[in-house]
Image: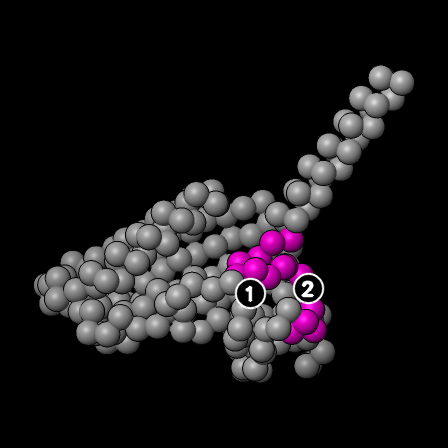
Amino acid sequence: MNALKSLAVATAFFLFVCAGAGAQEDAAPFGLKWMVSSDDITALGVELTPVELPGFGDSFTAAKLPKALSDIETVVLSFGYNDQLWRVAAISSDFENDKYGSRAKARFSELDTSLSKSYKTGESFQRTPTDSYFSEPENFAYALSQNEAFWYSTYSSPVATIELSLDSNHYDTFWRLIYSHIAGEKEFEAGKSDAELDAL
């Protein structure tokens, strides 16, 4: 009997661990799940509004997410060609007149620390320009807007890749965060190729 009880306990623990791992693999940011339909997302109380993003399939701006960061301005969910969530992109509200980039860099550092705790860190690239004008500290934001400066880091999990970056509209800076489900992206690319062939 003891042996049977031990086997039952071990089996239950194994199933619990497997269920937990599966839940982690399904987990997308902001309280969402990967590879679910747009109807599944709206069932959570999320409000979806169609947006034209041809490069990512059927896409929607999302409001009333289960979880969100306080300084998020816009979240876009992309479902590809088969109505399965594969990409989540978030853009912050502007840090107005942040020409030195100090507020954006501080927030970037906070987000980087948080992401590094949950995901494997990858490439970190912080390039400031060598040009005499764009290299001036007060022109950091403007350099970002002109692609003369770059500021981003990448992260990964077994199921997703993540990129955190800074950008600007002249002197107003903002951060951008993009999550891509690896298997979902492959399915999207395959669907994209099929859609292009159908257009011939």
Which residues are drawn in magenta? 26-43
Q: Is residue 18 left or right of residue 32?
A: right
Q: Is residue 141 left or right of residue 23?
A: left
- Is 7 placed above or below 78 here? above
Say whether residue 160 is visible. Answer: yes
Q: Earlier in the sequence, mark 1 or mark 2?
A: 2
Q: Position of residue 194 (x, y in %)?
A: 70, 71
Instruction: Please name whichever residue, 177 or 80, is drawn nearer the observer in this view of the structure.
Output: 177
Say whether residue 146 is visible. Answer: no
Q: Quadrant of the C terminus?
A: bottom right
Which numbered marker is on residue 129? none
Q: Residue at x 83, y 28 (%)?
A: 8
Which numbered marker is on residue 66? 1
Q: Check disc 2 and give the amino acid type.
A: Val
Instruction: Please name whichever residue, 82 or 127, is drawn nearer the observer in this view of the structure.
Output: 82
According to the picture, the residue beneath numbered tag 2 turns out to be 36
